[in-house]
């Protein structure tokens, strides 16, 4: 197996709570997920990323960890987790777990000991968190959960001091100036590697350290620590992939790859909203703009791309005009907005228009990096904006049109959250079972495109070469790899478009349509003319592309 398996991967993000309930208590769990691995294998994804499963009071769906070395009883046991990993590996699926190094829950024993001077272990844990007599320090750090938190400091009456938190007030930040904290988190990673994981998604990477007079993001000390983490993982279990969640501009994300000695992967946050912007404008300029700002990566590194995930569609990496545009287009109702983003799923964002969903996925699967799909988006699940916080995009997976959408055998009122049951997106209409048999379904289309992607290494590993047809409603590019050159054409507008592409420099002019296998024969001396229906996409392999190797 290649050490850089993540370059060919298609990741599938699972909220275990939402996916499948194996023990009938109304909450998804590891046994339920294990029983659905055949579905994921058949879908054609190659890696599964699990949202947090560790013990937690679940005030931030597990991003508030109270024990780094266990499994939340709602989800099962460590044995269940190891079984899941073994069954996934048996099917050729990799498993990526979460590491949440920046903060713990305020219920974590470390924090309980740190805050309480009478606690028997107070002396040991006193400096594991960031305490202050004043809430005036680090004033240049922004507040991330703007809709919920007025400050990054909260006063603790037990310790009689303020503690620092970049997220919810019940998630105190750990103090990385303390060598014991640094060491403890290295041990946590080793523990999860021991359980068999192939990779780790590292939460909230920019915020580990704080320094006065800075915005407390992306500090050199933070990078130094992650380089140490990488060296430790490389020594302990070479080939374990580290993926960073740094919601930053591309030039600020680049250092998270280091010289190939920090993270293997980083999400490309700024690209994501620009795919939606380009579709709303019917113009490729937003995507071209962000790609022009996207640096080449060191060897062994890869972008992670996505259209949606478990959080709000974040609009932090856009200008305020762009954010206003996105809100007006995609979140016309106030309940659709959250913090600096939009709490909606892919299908409702794109008006449930199959053509738009497909062209957005065509870009996701072919432009750069390795794509991440969010559970349920492969069947066009809807959201419930009336639920709190981000819960509306975390509703139960819709398996069939039976009770509780086939998610759980518990009484409906026992479900951790109600299933979507509206006339358009409700489980009676939108479910896996119905889409399995429908040849034109989004599910079957996704299976088909994932299979095509898997056959062509250029999608994960090739260089990107943007083409510049005069017609700006079309986004066209080549992906070039020693084994093949692929051409992708995406129509970003609802109207049919025509383009002429001069591809003479790239081969003798013959190309194969990857969907139909049809061979197009061009006139070597002329340009190729393409007509592309509204929101259509075309994927080709340029034949005899070996002429290109220069
Ligand atoms: C980013 C995670 O994606 C989000 O769900 C969580 O609330 C914050 N980090 C805090 O851990």
Image (tube, grey):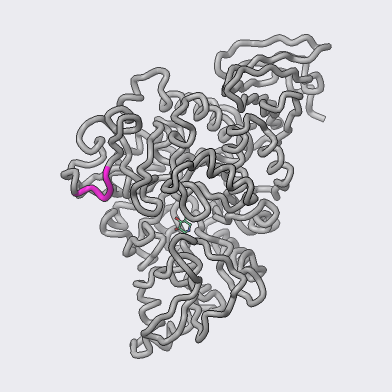
Residue 495 as seen in the image, left or right of residue 146: right
Residue 96 as seen in the image, left or right of residue 232: left
The furthest residue to the left: 411
Q: Main secondary structure of the magenta part?
A: loop
Say which residue appears at 34% left-offset and 20% top-offset. Answer: 437
* Quadrant of the drawing holding the N terminus: top right
User: x, y (%) of residue 357?
Assistant: 50, 30
Position of 432 relative to 3 (above/below): above
* Towards the viewer: 13 or 350: 350
Q: Quadrant of residue 467?
A: top right
* Towards the viewer: 92 or 153: 153
Question: Magenta segment range?
Answer: 414-418
* Towards the viewer: 543 or 294: 294
Say which residue appears at 38% left-offset and 72% top-offset. Answer: 106
User: x, y (%) of residue 64?
Assistant: 39, 64
Q: Inspect this view and state whether residue 33 appears.
A: yes
Position of 14 relative to 66 (above/below): above
Position of 389 relative to 345 (above/below): below
User: x, y (%) of residue 372?
Assistant: 51, 41
Q: Is residue 92 magenta?
A: no
């Amino acid at each position: 197996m290649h050490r850089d398996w993540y370059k060919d991967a298609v990741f599938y993000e699972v909220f275990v709570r939402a996916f499948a309930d194996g023990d009938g208590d109304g909450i998804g769990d590891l046994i339920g997920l294990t029983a659905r691995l055949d579905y994921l294998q058949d879908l054609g994804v190659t890696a599964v990323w699990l949202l947090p499963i560790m013990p937690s009071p679940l005030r931030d769906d597990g991003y508030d960890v109270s024990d780094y070395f266990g499994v939340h009883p709602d989800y099962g046991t460590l044995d269940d987790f190891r079984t899941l990993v073994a069954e996934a590996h048996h099917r050729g699926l990799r498993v990526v777990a979460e590491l949440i190094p920046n903060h713990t829950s305020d219920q974590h024993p470390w924090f309980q000991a740190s805050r309480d001077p009478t606690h028997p272990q107070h002396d040991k844990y006193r400096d594991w968190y960031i305490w202050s007599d004043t809430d005036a320090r680090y004033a240049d750090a922004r507040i991330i959960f703007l809709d919920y938190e007025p400050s990054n400091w909260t006063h603790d009456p037990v310790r009689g001091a303020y503690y620092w938190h970049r997220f919810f007030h019940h998630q105190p930040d750990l103090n990385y100036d303390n060598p014991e904290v640094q060491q403890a988190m290295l041990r946590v990673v080793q523990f999860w590697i021991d359980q068999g994981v192939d990779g780790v998604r590292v939460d909230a990477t920019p915020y580990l350290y704080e320094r006065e007079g800075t915005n407390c993001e992306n500090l050199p000390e933070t990078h130094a620590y992650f380089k140490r983490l990488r060296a430790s993982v490389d020594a302990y279990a070479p080939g374990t992939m580290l993926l960073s969640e740094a919601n930053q501009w591309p030039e600020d994300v680049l250092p998270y790859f280091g010289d190939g000695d920090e993270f293997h992967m980083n999400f490309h946050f700024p690209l994501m909203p620009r795919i939606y912007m380009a579709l709303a404008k019917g113009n490729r300029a937003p995507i071209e703009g962000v790609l022009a700002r996207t640096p080449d990566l060191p060897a062994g590194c890869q972008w992670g791309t996505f259209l949606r995930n478990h959080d709000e569609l974040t609009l932090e990496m856009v200008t305020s005009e762009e954010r206003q545009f996105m809100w007006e287009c995609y979140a016309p109702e106030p309940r659709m907005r959250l913090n600096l983003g939009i709490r909606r799923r892919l299908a409702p964002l794109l008006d449930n228009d199959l053509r738009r969903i497909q062209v957005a996925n065509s870009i996701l699967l072919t432009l750069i990096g390795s794509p991440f799909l969010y559970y349920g988006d492969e069947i066009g699940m809807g959201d419930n904006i009336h639920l709190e916080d981000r819960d509306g995009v975390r509703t139960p997976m819709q398996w069939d049109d039976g009770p509780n959408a086939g998610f759980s055998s518990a009484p409906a009122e026992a479900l951790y959250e109600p299933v979507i049951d509206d006339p358009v997106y409700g489980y009676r209409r939108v479910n896996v079972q119905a889409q399995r048999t429908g040849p034109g379904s989004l599910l079957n289309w996704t299976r088909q495109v994932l299979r095509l992607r898997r056959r062509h290494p250029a999608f994960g590993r090739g260089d990107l070469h943007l083409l510049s047809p005069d017609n700006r409603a079309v986004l066209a590019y080549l992906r070039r790899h020693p084994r093949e050159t692929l051409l992708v054409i995406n129509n970003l507008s609802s109207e049919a478009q025509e383009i002429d592409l001069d591809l003479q420099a790239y081969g003798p002019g013959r190309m194969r349509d990857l969907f139909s296998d049809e061979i197009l024969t061009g006139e070597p001396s002329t340009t190729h003319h393409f007509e592309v229906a509204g929101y259509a996409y075309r994927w080709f392999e340029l034949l005899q592309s070996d002429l290109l190797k220069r």
